[in-house]
Amino acid sequence: MGAQGTDVETIARLTAEINQLKKERRAVLLAHVYQRPEVQEVADFTGDSLQLAQQAAKTDADVIVFCGVHFMAESAAILAPEKTVLLPDQHAGCPMADMVTAEALVQKKKAMPDAVVVAYVNTSAAVKAECDICCTSSNALKVVASLPEDRPILFLPDRNLGDWVMKRTGRAMTLWPGYCNTHDRLTVAEVQAAREAHPEAELLVHPECQPEVVAMADFVASTTGLINYAVQSPKDSFIVATEAGVLHPLTTQAPHKHFYMASSKLICPNMKMTTLEKILWSLQDMEPRITVDAPIREKALASLERMLALA
């Protein structure tokens, strides 16, 4: 059975077994902040895509257990090819990442031969291999601002993040027509209803949301940026417009504050696929293992390293 809904004793038992196996395997467990609370609790490090990539690049563990989605585990395999990278549920994918293929990108590059290609990390290794530099929502502004002003920019795959970056940097970009299924479904009407229900609360919005929603925000940032802002702010009430998993670090770090989800729909089913049982099974069997073929890895590594240099 899944860890969601399991009792406290079961969670404690699974956590203890996972911690023991981590020691035996010399494993580090990385978890995205959209993961289930009990998964975040057993992790050695939690964070957003940029922070997790940084951890994968510098860990001295033999095994990386990546509690996230497929493209994240691929990035870990690219950055740490000598490590064993495990993804507890190999079906945990990212619909946005699937909206751009390497083949389609190659064709687009032929139509824009002078363009600098910027890939959101929410892409496959094969797509990263066809790009010039990667970015996350944490450093997209810095990445785009660093690019030559006399070169056109192709930004992929998230049109919403790209729109926000264009408005903030003033750089014109050609945007790939992709989007996050979870963030993009949040509507202006839902945000208006949340504000009416909680008029005292500030609205915190992730830039993967639609531009009309982003325009309503009191503060826009990556997941880590939103967490840090809410924790450090003198305000004590917030409407949260990002994936619901972020409530765990928010309520843990600021237990005296009030957090309200902008919509009950802000749940990524892929991020919730990972359970304590699957983590345990993965460490027991050392599967599913994520690898990236050397030719693709070498090209994708260059785009990731350029991103990390600007982190």
Image (spheres, rainbow, N blue to C red):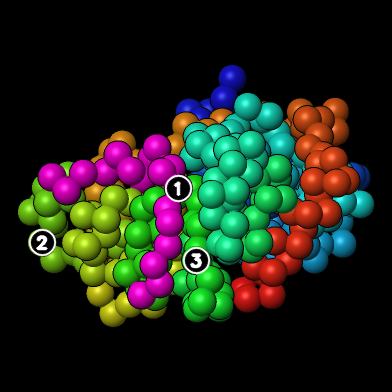
Quarter residue 135 falls in: bottom right
Local crowd at mark 1 within 10 Å, few (<14), some, or many (≥20)?
some
Q: Which residue is drawn at 80% across and 46% down?
A: 296
* Front label number (3 vs 2): 3
Which quarter of the rendering shows the N terminus?
A: top right
Quarter residue 256 falls in: bottom left
Residue 27 in the image, given as x and y percentages of width and height: 83, 49
Label 1, secondary structure: give it: loop
Which disc, if any, is residue 251? Answer: none
Quarter residue 88 falls in: top right
| Residue type beneath disc 2 | Pro
Which quarter of the rendering shows the C terminus?
A: bottom right
| Residue type beneath disc 1 | Trp
Q: How far apart are marks 3 and 1 (CA)?
A: 14 Å
Local crowd at mark 3 within 10 Å, few (<14), some, or many (≥20)?
some
What residue is pinned by disc 3? 152
Which disc, if any, is residue 176? Answer: 1
* Front label number (3 vs 1): 3
| Residue type beneath disc 3 | Pro
Q: Nearer the viewer, residue 58 or 41?
A: 58
Q: Is residue 273 visible?
A: yes
Residue farthest along the left direction in this orientation: 196
N-term mark: 3 or 1 = 3
Q: In the rendered structure, does residue 278 fall within the stretch colored magenta?
A: no
Q: Nearer the viewer, residue 155 or 198?
A: 155
Please state the extent of the stretch shown in magenta in the rendering. 170-189
Label 2, secondary structure: give it: loop
N-term mark: 3 or 2 = 3
Q: In this view, does 2 lie to the left or right of 279?
A: left
Label 3, secondary structure: give it: loop
Q: Residue at x 49, y 57 (%)?
A: 155
Residue 217 in the image, given as x and y percentages of width and height: 23, 64
